[in-house]
Image (tube, grey):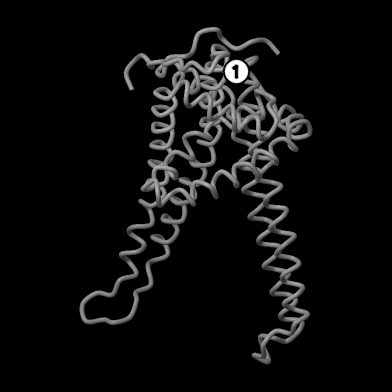
């Protein structure tokens, strides 16, 4: 693997280059779509099996409480679904950041890059997730004495963990330590990038709520009516269509997010200091 650019990317250059790479490589977002579809399909199968078992046992017809065996079976199915969903989420995260690293490396990528990274880096990513859970618990403990600063610092100081595990090929706990060092040495660009990327994500989530507002108002009673109103079919259809479009946009954004964060990581590690002395970078260009 060749070395990333020697000079750190300016903030405006980072976003423009990330968007240019993402426009040519929409497939970077594919793992997130695959994971979302897989989880929804598994939920549908789980619900279908549960309903089928309940109908065959006559629980609906007899209106009786489910037996212990039925509850145990549902719990087993739920645990299998939960473990499978977690594994699919880990694969999607690993594949997305591996493909993002590949587009910075050679300008293009395929799902094969993501699958190869999962086979080689999946174990390190699991260790990193365990470490992140531990750091998150510590942040919760320190939330009260630090007046919430620990909770605000947690996502900031761990923002480079996934790029470090996948692109930097760091071990799980080593990636967490490197993320802390990079944020400490490059606090300004890290904060600005994190805030802008979060603001874009928040804007997308707000867009998802827009088609739901008319639907919520349609349920409200009018005049002297005390019962909830049933919205019209076209309103329900267009609200659902708009919400689905926002979900698709949110999943697609994960690809751009991975590319932007990976690009900043590659840029910073190409000139990260070897001594504990901090190095301050002021991002150039308009925000």
Rendered position, 198 above or below 57: above
Residue under the point 62% across and 20% down: 103
Q: Quadrant of the C terminus?
A: top left
Observer able to see residue 16: yes
- The picture places residue 74, in percent across and down from the top left corner, at 72, 71
User: Which picture quadrant has residue 3?
Assistant: top right
Residue under the point 52% across and 27% down: 261
User: Which picture quadrant has residue 176?
Assistant: top right
- The picture places residue 27, in percent across and down from the top left corner, at 62, 30
Observer able to see residue 27: no
Rendered position, 56 above or below 152: below
The residue identified by callout 1 is: 104
Residue under the point 36% across and 14% down: 284
Which sits in the foreground, 51 or 172?
A: 172
Which sits in the foreground, 11 or 34?
A: 11
- The picture places residue 109, in percent across and down from the top left corner, at 67, 23
Residue found at the very far left of the displayed protein: 223
Residue under the point 51% across and 32% down: 257
Taking 159 as reference, is 130 left or right?
A: right
Helix, strand or loop for disc 1: helix
């Amino acid at each position: 693997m060749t070395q990333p650019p020697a000079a750190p990317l300016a903030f405006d250059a980072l976003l423009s280059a990330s968007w240019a790479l993402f426009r040519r490589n929409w497939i970077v977002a594919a793992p997130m779509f695959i994971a979302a579809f897989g989880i929804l399909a598994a939920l549908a199968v789980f619900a279908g099996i549960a309903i089928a078992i309940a109908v065959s046992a006559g629980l609906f017809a007899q209106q009786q409480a489910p037996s212990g065996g039925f509850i145990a079976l549902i719990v087993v199915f739920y645990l299998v679904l939960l473990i499978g969903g977690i594994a699919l989420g880990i694969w999607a995260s690993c594949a997305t950041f591996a493909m993002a690293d590949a587009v910075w490396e050679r300008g293009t990528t395929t799902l094969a890059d993501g699958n190869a990274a999962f086979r080689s880096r999946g174990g390190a990513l699991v260790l990193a997730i365990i470490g992140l859970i531990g750091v998150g618990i510590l942040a919760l403990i320190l939330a009260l004495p630090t007046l919430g600063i620990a909770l605000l610092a947690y996502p900031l100081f761990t923002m480079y963990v996934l790029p470090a595990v996948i692109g930097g090929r760091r071990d799980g706990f080593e990636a967490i330590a490197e993320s802390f060092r990079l944020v400490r040495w490059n606090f300004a660009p890290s904060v600005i990038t994190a805030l802008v990327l979060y603001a874009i994500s928040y804007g997308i989530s707000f867009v998802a709520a827009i088609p739901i507002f008319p639907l919520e108002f349609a349920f409200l009673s009018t005049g002297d009516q005390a019962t909830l109103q049933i919205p019209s079919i076209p309103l329900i259809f267009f609200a659902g269509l708009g919400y689905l479009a926002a979900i698709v946009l949110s999943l697609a954004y994960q690809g751009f997010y991975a590319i932007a964060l990976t690009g900043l990581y590659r840029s910073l590690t190409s000139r990260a200091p070897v001594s504990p002395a901090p190095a301050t970078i002021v991002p150039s260009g308009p925000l």
